[in-house]
């Protein structure tokens, strides 16, 4: 398994293949800044929860670094991991149902109360029809994460994968570390 | 009615997170779903919640939504006739 591209996003900085990208915003606003600067053609971004926004912009920057867009394919997997699951959005949803006198469950927030939605968002954007999976771990374990991806390469279909750690505790505490790897 | 139409447009933009859309961008008679704003089924559910939260209107028959949410004008007409707040 060979790493072709890698990206690291925190609330204050972005590193693509080891090079810091110039950014001015912090926290959730940083993700919007990255979207505006580097993508800006996918309005559904604004409907996503913070975890999906994080995974989406990380994938977009990685794939732009790859060059020719490899899409409409079943040989690329999206395999992500984190610790907080969809907690950030779960809290937001809970706020819509916490007061019985102001009880208006939000359907658009509810649909993001699962962590694996982010893998679907990336697959839909790129028309990836292969494996998508999301694992919630007690702690980051890079060698375990690699072993999961290596197992996917043995399925006879997968030849490359977007994989990594996409964790979002709240608006100001998140981290994405994603790699584009090939068999 | 014009005031209600503008209010609805602002609410649609806010609750559906239509970040780059301004009220003036929404044609009063343009279809909200499919073409037009390109809203989806989750947006439809969010509009049903908005009707209850803002205007006290409970839409019990989901199939009625097709006519109510046809355009901003049809929404405004329905709200003006059925609102309880």
Image (cartoon, rainbow, N blue to C red):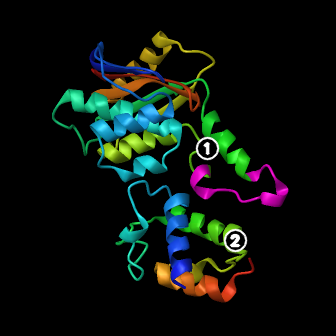
Quarter placement of the N terminus of chain B = bottom right
Rendered image quadrant of residue A156: top left
Chain letter behind tag 2: B
In this figure, which residue is indicated by the disc labeled 1?
Answer: A113
Residue A176 can be seen in this image: yes
- Determine whether, in the image, residue B32 is placed left or right of residue A63: right
Q: Which residues are magenta?
A: A97-109
- In the image, residue A134 lies at what x, y percent? 51, 32
Viewer-closest of A7 and B83 = B83
Mark 2: give few (<14), some (14-19) or many (20+) Cα within 10 Å.
Answer: some
In this figure, which residue is indicated by the disc labeled 2?
Answer: B52
Rendered image quadrant of residue A36: top left
Residue A7 versus residue A45 in the image, above or below: above
- Determine whether, in the image, residue A22 is placed left or right of residue A133: left
Residue A25 versus residue A119 in the image, above or below: above
Viewer-closest of A147 and B12 = B12
CB atoms of marks 2 and 1 within 8 Å: no
Residue under the image location 69 percent in, 57 percent down: A105
- Determine whether, in the image, residue B38 is placed left or right of residue A83: left
Instruction: Tell me the tag on residue A38.
Output: none
Q: Marks 2 and 1, how far apart in space?
A: 23 Å
Residue A107 included in the magenta stretch of the image: yes
Residue A142 included in the magenta stretch of the image: no
- In the image, residue A139 lies at what x, y percent? 60, 15
Residue B25 versus residue A31 in the image, above or below: below
Rendered image quadrant of residue B7: bottom right
């Amino acid at each position: 398994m060979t790493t072709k591209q890698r990206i690291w996003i925190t609330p204050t900085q972005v590193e693509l293949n080891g090079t810091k990208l110039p950014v001015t915003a912090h926290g959730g606003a940083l993700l919007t800044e990255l979207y505006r600067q580097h993508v800006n053609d996918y309005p559904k971004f604004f409907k996503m929860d913070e975890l999906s926004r994080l995974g989406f912009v990380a994938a977009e920057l990685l794939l732009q670094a790859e060059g020719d867009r490899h899409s409409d394919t079943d040989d690329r997997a999206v395999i992500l991991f984190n610790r907080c699951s969809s907690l950030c959005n779960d809290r937001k949803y809970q706020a819509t149902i916490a007061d019985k006198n102001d009880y208006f469950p939000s359907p658009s927030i509810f649909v993001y109360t699962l962590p694996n939605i982010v893998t679907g968002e990336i697959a839909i954007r790129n028309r990836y029809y292969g494996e998508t999976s999301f694992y919630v771990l007690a702690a980051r374990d890079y060698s375990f994460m690699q072993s999961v991806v290596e197992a996917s390469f043995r399925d006879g279909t997968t030849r490359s994968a977007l994989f990594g750690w996409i964790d979002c505790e709240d608006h100001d505490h998140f981290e994405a570390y994603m790699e584009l790897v090939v068999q | 009615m014009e005031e209600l139409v503008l209010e609805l447009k602002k609410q649609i933009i806010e609750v559906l997170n239509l970040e780059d859309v301004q009220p003036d961008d929404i044609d009063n008679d343009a279809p909200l779903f499919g073409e037009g704003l390109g809203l989806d089924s989750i947006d439809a559910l969010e509009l049903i919640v908005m009707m209850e939260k803002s205007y006290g209107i409970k839409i019990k028959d989901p199939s009625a939504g097709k006519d109510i949410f046809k355009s901003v004008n049809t929404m405004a007409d329905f709200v003006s006739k059925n609102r309880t707040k």
